Image: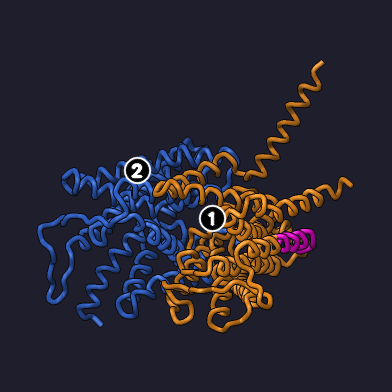
Chain colours: A blue, B orange
Amino acid sequence: MWNDMFIQLLIGAIMLGGIYGLLGLGYGLIYKTSGLMSFAQGEILMIGAFLGYTFFKLFHLPFVVALLATMFIMFLFGFLFEKTIIRTILGRGGTAIHVVLATIGISIALQNVAAIIWTSEIQQFPPIFNVEYLEFGMVKVAPESISGIVVALGCMVLLHLFMNNTKLGTAMRAAAQDSSAANVCGINVSFAKGLSWAISSALAAVSGIIIGPVYGVYMLMGALIGLKGFAAAVIGGYGNMYGAILGGLIIGVIETMAAGYLSSTYKDFIAFSVFIVFLVLKPTGIFNEKIIES
Amino acid sequence: MARHKNLFIAMAFVVFLAGLPVMLGNNAYLMLVLCLSGIFVIASSGLDLLFGYSGQISIGHAAFYAVGAYTSAILTTKLGVSVWFGILMGGVLATVFAALIAIPISKLVHMFLALVTIGIGELTHQAIINLPELTGGFTGVKLIPMPRIGSYVFDGISYYYIILAFVILSLIVKKHIVDSRIGRAFIAIRESTDAANAVGINVTYYKTVAFASSAMFTGIAGALYAHYVGFISPESFTLDQSVLFLTAVLCGGMGTFVGPIIGSVVIIFINETFQALGSYQMLVYGIFIVVAVIYVPAGLVGAVRMFRGNLFKVVKRFADKP
C-alpha cells in the first residue's frame, strides 16, 4: 500500500484536509460564540485567494507580506460583517435562518464581485518557490502543497495557543461556553462574537491562499469547499476545534483516495454521503459535542 | 357573507389570471414569466408547508424538484408514457423519496437539519450527474414532450392554463392540509415540539408527513417545469435552486397562502428583469437577498400586516384627537 502514488495522494489529502479543517474551525468558532451558521466562508476563502493573488502577482509583494495583508483585511471584513449586517438582522427580529439566508446572499454577491473585478477566468499564482517540484524517490511534490500544510498547521497551533494561553482567548472560550456568566465576569461578549467571526474569516482567507497556488484561483472555487468545511465540522463534533481538524483530515483523505483509486467523478458523491451518514447516525461527531435534538 | 370574503377575492383573482394571457396580448416573454411563476408558486407552497407551517428548515428542496422533473422526463422520453402519468409519477416518487429520508432526518432540528438537507440536495445533484445511462449526466434529457389529450397538444398558451389549474389545485390541497388535524399538528410542532409530544402528537410521524407532502408539491412542480422547458440538466437542480425556493418563502411570508405566491412572483420577476444587467445580475440578486432579510424579516406579508397595524394606530390617533 505504501507505494508512490499513495504517498502523492496522501500529501494532497493532508493539504485538503488542513483546509477543510480550517474552515470547519471557523464554523465551529462562530457557532460556539453566537449560535449562528455562516454560509459565506467558502466565498471568503475565494476572496482571500484572489486578494493574495493580487498582492503577490500584481503588486509584486513578497509572499509572506501578501499572506499577512490578506489575512488582516479579511479579519477586518469578518469583524465588520458581524457588527453591521448580523447585528442588524438580529436586532430587527431576524432569527438564525435569516442570518443563514443573509450569508448566502453575501456569498452570491462576493462571487460576482470577484467575477467583476478579476474576471471569471481561472487565474494562476506564479510559483512561490524557485523549485518546481520536490522529489522524494519517484514521488514528485509541488512545494506549494508542503508549504500549504505547514501554514495550515501553523495557524492551528497559533489558534490553540491563543485560545488557551492568552487572556483574550480564554475570554472568548468563556463567552462561548456561557455568555451570561461571561458577561457577569466583565467579559465583553459582544467583542468576543465579533472576534470569532473575524478569526473565522482570517482562517478562510488563509485557506484560500493555501489552495490557490495548487489549484488556481477562480470565482467558484469556494462553493463546494465551503460545504465540505461543514462536513469537517460535523464529523469532528460541531464547535470542537480539534474535532474540526480531525474531521477535515478524514474528509480530505476519503475524498482524495476515492478520486485516486475509484474515480474523480464519484469523489463528491462519496464525500457528501459520509457527511449525511454522520449527520444521521452520529450528529454529535467524533468528539461528542452537544447538539440540539428534538 | 364576510366569512366568504376571502373566497370571493380568490375567485375573482382566478378569473383575472385566466384572462391574463389575452390582456397581455399573448406576449411570449410575459407568458414565460407567468408560467415559471406558477411553477414556482407550487414548489414554494410545498416548502412553505414544511418550513412555514411545520418549522422544519430545508435548503435542499431542489432534490425533490429534481426527482419530479427527471422522473417525468425519463418516463415520457424513454418509455413513452403519457405526460399526465409522468407528472403524477414525478409527484409520487418525490413523495416516497422524501418520506424515506424524513424518517432518519426528523430527529435533527435547526442548523443540523439545514445541513443535512443541503447534503441531500448535493447528493441528489451528484447522483444525477453520476448516472448518465439513466439521466443523461451533464447532457441532460432532451425533447421532453408537452401533455396531450387525444391529438390536441397543450403547448404555448394552453400549457399556461394547465399550470394555472395545477396552482389552484395545489392551493386547495394546501388549504385542506392546513385546516385539518395534520395542519394543526404541523403548527404545534413548529411552536413547541416538546409541548406537541406532551399532548400526544406523534412528532416523527407528522414531521415525515410534512416532508412527504411538501415534496409532493415540489415534485409535481418539477415535472411541470420539465415539460414546459423541454430540456433539463443537472445545472437547474443545485443549491442555488433550493435557495431560490427558500428565498421565495421567506421574503413572501412563511406560513401563509399569499406569501409563497408573492415571493415566487417577486423572485421570478427579479430574476428575469435583472437579466438585462448581464454579469451584474447575480450581484444584485445577492444584495437583494441581504436587504430583504434585513428589512422584511417577516416577509412581505408580515410587512403589510405591520403596516396595516401601524396605519390603524395612526388613523386611530387622529380620530381620537378632540
The residue under the point 45% across, 38% down is A83
Q: Amino acid at mark 2?
A: Phe
Q: Secondary structure at mark 1?
A: helix
Q: Quadrant of the C terminus of chain B?
A: top right
| Residue identified by numbered label 2 | A75
Circle 2 crowding by C-alpha within 10 Å: few under 14, some 14–19, many from 20: many
Asked whether A219 or B228 is in front, the reply is B228
Q: Residue furthest right?
A: B1
Verify whether residue B302 appears in magenta: no
Q: Is residue A250 above or below residue A154?
A: below
Q: Is residue B71 visible?
A: yes
Q: Chain of mark 1?
A: B
Lateral position of residue A17 relative to residue B84, left or right: left
Where residue A280 appears, as percent x and y from the top left, is 54, 70
Asked whether A229 or B83 is in front, the reply is B83
Circle 1 crowding by C-alpha within 10 Å: few under 14, some 14–19, many from 20: many
**Where does the magenta region start and end?**
B168-183
Asked whether A56 or B6 is in front, the reply is B6
Could you tell me what secondary structure mostly forms the magenta stretch?
A: helix
| Residue identified by numbered label 1 | B244
Where residue B72 appears, as percent x and y from the top left, is 58, 75
Lateral position of residue B60 relative to residue B194, left or right: left
